[in-house]
Image (spheres, grey):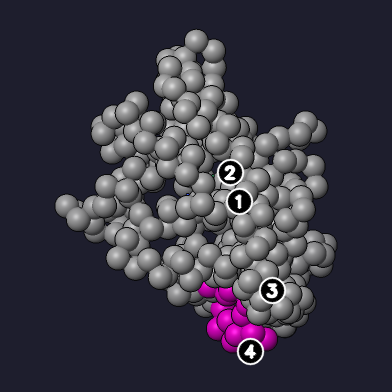
Amino acid sequence: MNTTHTILTGDRPTGQLHLGHFVGSLRQRVQLQQEHQQFILIADLQGLTDNGSNPQKISHNILEVMADYLAVGIDPSRTTICLQSALPALAELTALYMNIVTVARVERNPTVKNEIAQKGFSRALPVGFMAYPISQAADITAFNADLVPVGDDQLPMIEQTNEIVHKMNSLTSTPVLRHCKAQLSDVSRLPGIDGGAKMSKSLGNTLTLSASEADIHQAVSAMYTDPNHLRVTDPGQIEGNIVFTYLDAFHPDKTLVAEMKAHYQRGGLGDRQCKNVLEACLQELLAPIRERRATFIQDKGQLMAMLREGSERAHTLTQQTLHTVKRGLGLPVLF
Ligand code: TRP
C-alpha cells in the first residue's frame, strides 16, 4: 500500500477489548494511522441492535473502548475516533439506503444469517439487527472510506456496501458514493485461552487489555497444549497447541519461536518452559497498556472530550456525504 487511503474500522462497544482485538485489528490500526487518513467508529447503534433491552451495557462500554484505543497507541491527533450515535447523517443515510435493499437480500447475508441462527432470535428478531449491514454500509460510505480492514466474517458487509454504492450511483447523474475494498488481516483469528476457535467475550475465554499480572499468569498456566506430550522428552505436537499459536501471534523473536517449535517436536522441551516464555512476552506486552489504560479510564471527562472532538470532525464530513446523496436524489437540502 503506497497510496494514501481513507480507512474506516469500527467496534461495537459490548465489552472491553481483548487480545483477539489486539492481534486482529488494533495493532494494524496503530500502523495504519502513520500513513493513511483513518477513522474509527465506536458503533454503539450497531451494538444496540442485539442489546435493545440492555442499553446500559452499550453506554457503559463506550468509554471503556475509548480507553482501550488510547492505551494501545491509537493517537487521536492522527486517527479520528468518533461515536456512531452522535452522527445523525449515518442514521439518515441508513434510512435512504433501506429503500434500495430488498428483504431477500438482507436475508441472504451469510454473516447475519449465522448470527440470527446462533442467537436463536426466531420471530423475536429485532428489525434493527436484520438491517445492520445497511447501517454499516452507511458508515462506510459516509466517511468516503475506500479501505476497510476487517475479519473475514465482515466480507459480506463489504460486498453489500458495494452493491448499495453501485445502485445509488446508478440513480444519480454523477456518482455520489465511493466503492470500498476489504483489507483482510494477515494474521489468523486468535483462539480463546481455552483453545476454542475464537477469543470472544461471550465465550468467556478472553484476556482483556486490562488483565492483571495474575490473570495473565493464570490464563497461560491453564492453556491447552498437546495432551499426548506427557514427558518432557516425548516429541510434542505444534498443531492445535495454542501456546505456540500465541507465541506466533505475540513473540517478537520469530527465530527463537522457530527453534522452540523444532525442539518441542523433537522432544526435550517442556510445556512449562514454553509457557514461561509466552507468559514473559504477554506480561511485557500488556504491562504498559494496562498502565496507560488505568490512567485514561480515571478521567472519563477527558475521554468524553476527546470523543466529542473526533465526533465533531466526523459530523462535518458525514453531513457532507449526506448532502451529496440528497442532492443526487433530487431531495432539497434545507439546512
Ligand atoms: N460490524 C463491525 C463489528 O462487529 C463493527 C462496525 C460497525 C464496522 N460499523 C463499521 C466495521 C464500519 C467496519 C466499518 O466488528
- The residues tagged by marks 2 and 3 sit, at their Cα atoms, a distance apart of 24 Å
Query: Which residue is depicted at the point 82% across and 65% down?
Result: 253
The circle drawn on residue 63 is: none
Check residue 311 in the rendering and tell me which mark sits there, or answer none.
1
Q: Amino acid at mark 4?
A: Ala
Coordinates of residue 310 in the picture (x, y in percent): 65, 52
Which quadrant of the structure image shows residue 204? bottom left
What label sits on residue 296 in the rendered view?
3
Q: CA distance from mark 4 to mark 2?
A: 42 Å
Q: Nearer the viewer, residue 168 or 242?
A: 168
Q: Which residues are magenta?
A: 206-223
- From the Cβ of disc 2, is ligand 1 less than 8 Å away? no
Label 1 crowd bin: few (<14), some (14–19), many (20+), radius 10 Å: many
Q: How far apart in space, not on screen, are marks 1 and 3 (Cα)?
A: 19 Å
Name the element at disc 4: helix
- Residue type at mark 1? Ser
Where is mark 4, residue-wise?
214
Residue 315's label in the rendered image is: 2
What's the distance in space between the residues labelled 3 and 4, CA to CA? Answer: 22 Å
Query: Hey, which residue is sitting farthest top in the picture?
Result: 173
Mark 1 or 3, closer to the camera:
1
| Number of residues whose C-alpha sits closer than 10 Å to that of mark 4, classed few (under 14), some (14–19) or many (20 or more) | few
- Residue 249 on image: x %, y %: 68, 62
Residue drawn at the location 48% of the way across and 18% of the way down: 328
